[in-house]
Image: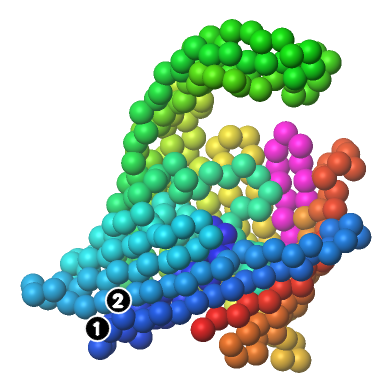
Amino acid sequence: MNRSKIIASSALASVMAASAANAEMSISGLYAGTLTDADGGGLASGFSSNSIYVSYSDSMDNGMGVSVAMSLTAEGLLTDVNFDTGMGVIGLGNGQDSSVDKLDGSPACFSLNVCGGAEMGQFDDGDTKSGDSVMYTNSFMGWTVKVSRGESVASAAGTDGMQMDIDDGTITTLAAGADLTTDADDVVTTVRLSGTAAVEGHDAVMSYATKGSFMGATIAAGLSSIDMNGATADTDPSFVTVSYPLAGFNLGYAMYDGDNGNEETQMGVGGSMMGYDVGVGFYDLDATTDSEKMRVSVSKGMGAASFGLDYTETDVSGTDTGDADEWNFMYVVGF
C-alpha cells in the first residue's frame, strides 16, 4: 500500500467522521511533493499525491448508514460507496482496493510520504487485478476483518499482424497470440505494426486481511488469492506486520511473501526527539538477486504543512548495478 493511499485514507476518514453528525458534504485536499538527489546526479522534483477529497455521509430511511467518498487524483476520479448495515460495512465503487492493500502498510517505515508496503520485491497485493472490488468490513473484539472480491478478466485471443526489425527495416508476419521477438545482436530490435498479442485473463481475486491488538502489539495479516487462466503460475501473496511501543519508541516488523520466490523482511524503530519524529528502517529482499536497503528519516509537523528528510542506501548483492545513495526532501500540505 503506497504512502499516498495511506494519507488519502486518513484524510477521507477525517472528513467522513466530521460530516457524519450533520450529514453534510466535506472537502479536503493534499499535496505531497519530493525533491530527490540520487547518487549526486542532480536534483529532481516530483509528487506522490496531488489530490482533492470530497465525502458525504447520512442515514437511509431504514436506519442504515451510507457514505460516499470521492478522490480526484492524477490517476483519475475514484468513488467509494459504503453501506453500514449494522452487521458490517459493504463497500462498492471503483475506489475499493483489495483487502490486503488496505492493511499492508509497513510499521517499519518512518518516512513522511514514501512509506507503503513491500518496497523492493515483486509483491502483488491483488489490488490492480481486483479492479472494482466488493469489500465487506466488520469488527470483532477489537479486530477489524476485511474480505474483498475483485472482478474476473477473460482471456483475449491474439490476432495476426506484422512486426518490423528496427535495425534493417525488415517486416515479418506476427502470428496470432505471438509477442515481439528480438535478434541476438540487440536487446530490443522490433516494434509491433499491427495485430495484438494474446492477453491472459484471471479469476476474481479474493483477498482477506485483519488487524488488531494483542498484548500491547498491533498486528496485521492478510492473503490474496490470484488464479490465472493461462501459463502464468497462480500465487497467494501474504503479509504480516507487527508494531510495538517500547520506552517511548515504536518498534516495527513486516514480512511480505510474494509466493513467487520473492520475500521481503522489514524492521525499524522510530520515535520523537527534540520535537522531531525520527526513525530508521532496514529492508532485506530474498530473491533471485538479493538486495538490502537502509533508510534514516527525520520529519517535523508544522500544522497545515509537514517537512521531512530521508537518507536511503541500497545495496544489490553481487553487483554494483542498482546500488544507490539517495536524499529526499519531502513536504506535505493539506487543507
Q: Secondary structure beneath disc 1?
A: loop
On screen, residue 221 above or below 6? above
Q: Which mark is residue 334?
A: none
Q: Quadrant of the N terminus?
A: bottom right
On screen, residue 186 above or below 45? above
Q: Residue at x 46, y 69 (%)?
A: 9
Q: What is the quadrant of residue 151 in the picture?
A: top left
- Residue 113 picture location, percent across and down: 64, 69
Query: Viewed as shown, does residue 250 lie left or right of 314?
Result: left
Q: Quick check: marks 2 and 1 in contact, CB under 8 Å?
A: yes
Q: Residue reaching furthest left?
A: 62
Q: Residue at x 26, y 77 (%)?
A: 57
> Main structural element of the magenta stretch: helix, strand or loop?
strand
Question: Which tag, 2 or 1, sits closer to the chain's start?
Answer: 1
Q: In the rendered structure, does residue 38 fall within the stretch colored magenta?
A: no
Mark 1: few/some/many CA within 10 Å (<14, 14-19, 20+): some
- Residue 55 picture location, percent across and down: 34, 75
Q: What is the quadrant of residue 271 in the picture?
A: bottom right
Mark 2: few/some/many CA within 10 Å (<14, 14-19, 20+): many
- Residue 94 picture location, percent across and down: 36, 54
Task: Estimate the spatial distance between the alpha carbons at disc 2 and disc 1, rounded to whole Å.
Answer: 7 Å
Query: Viewed as shown, does residue 258 lie left or right of 191?
Result: left
Is residue 108 among what the camera can see?
Answer: no
Q: Which residue is drawn at 81% across and 53% down?
A: 314
Q: Residue 56 carries which label?
A: 2
Q: Residue at x 21, y 78 (%)?
A: 58
Q: Which mark is residue 23?
A: 1
On screen, residue 227 above or below 25? above
Q: Give the range drawn in magenta.
A: 281-292
Q: The residue under label 1 is which amino acid type?
A: Ala
